[in-house]
Image: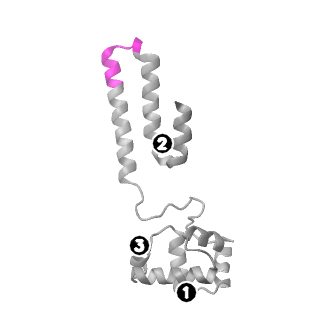
Amino acid sequence: MAYHWGRYYAVRHSWKKWPPLIVLSLLLSWNVFFGYSCDFFVLVNVNTIALMVAVILMLTSFFYRKTDTEDLPDGVIDLEPSDRFIENCRKFMLSPRELEVVLLSRKGLKNKRIAEELFISERTVEGHLRNIYDKVGCDRSKLVLINRLNG
């Protein structure tokens, strides 16, 4: 059972969703190994506390998830662009506004959020991204664009 949880859960979900699963697994193993030898009230109290902790962990991961970023890999999203990234942007002759759009896209922001940050319309952001894709010579994927500009 642990093998299937680890294999499926690690691939499909981020590491931030692991704590409730760990708490519930510890609760299950505690019940299996020590549940028969404990007093009934101790068993009920431990189960209640462990379930409350698992529910709280699930709720905190629900309320504090990022909603304005796309699902880009962790290594792609950096706060500061590298020198190679800026050099490649210059090599492809991106305008200053296109550079701003690329930098915000690199942080994982969606087009709507980029438009809000730059005080332009979402259609303008899409136009800038089209121009950037054409200049860089890649398909319409932000991940491919960022990887090509990273070097």
Identify which amino acid the numbered label 1 is placed on. Answer: Pro
Identify which amino acid the numbered label 3 is placed on. Answer: Arg
* Residue 18 numbered mark, or none: 2
Question: Regarding mark 3 in the picture, which secondary structure is present there?
Answer: helix
> Relative to 62, does residue 105 appear above or below in the rendering?
below
Q: Are marks 1 and 2 in contact (CB under 8 Å)?
A: no
Question: Regarding mark 2 in the picture, which secondary structure is present there?
Answer: helix
Q: x, y (%) of residue 52?
A: 33, 35
Q: Which circle's residue, 3 or 2, is located before the other in the chain? A: 2
| Closer to us: 62 or 49 | 62
Question: For mark 2, does the 10 Å Cα neighbourhood hold few (<14), some (14 to 19), or many (20 or more) residues?
Answer: some
> Relative to 20, does residue 60 appear above or below in the rendering?
below
Question: Regarding mark 1 in the picture, which secondary structure is present there?
Answer: helix
> Relative to 6, does residue 139 appear above or below in the rendering?
below
Identify which amino acid the numbered label 2 is placed on. Answer: Trp
Q: Which residues are magenta?
A: 36-46
Q: Residue at x 46, y 45 (%)?
A: 17
The alpha-carbon separation of the residues under discs 3 and 1 comes to 18 Å
Query: What residue sits right under mark 3 in the picture?
Result: 113
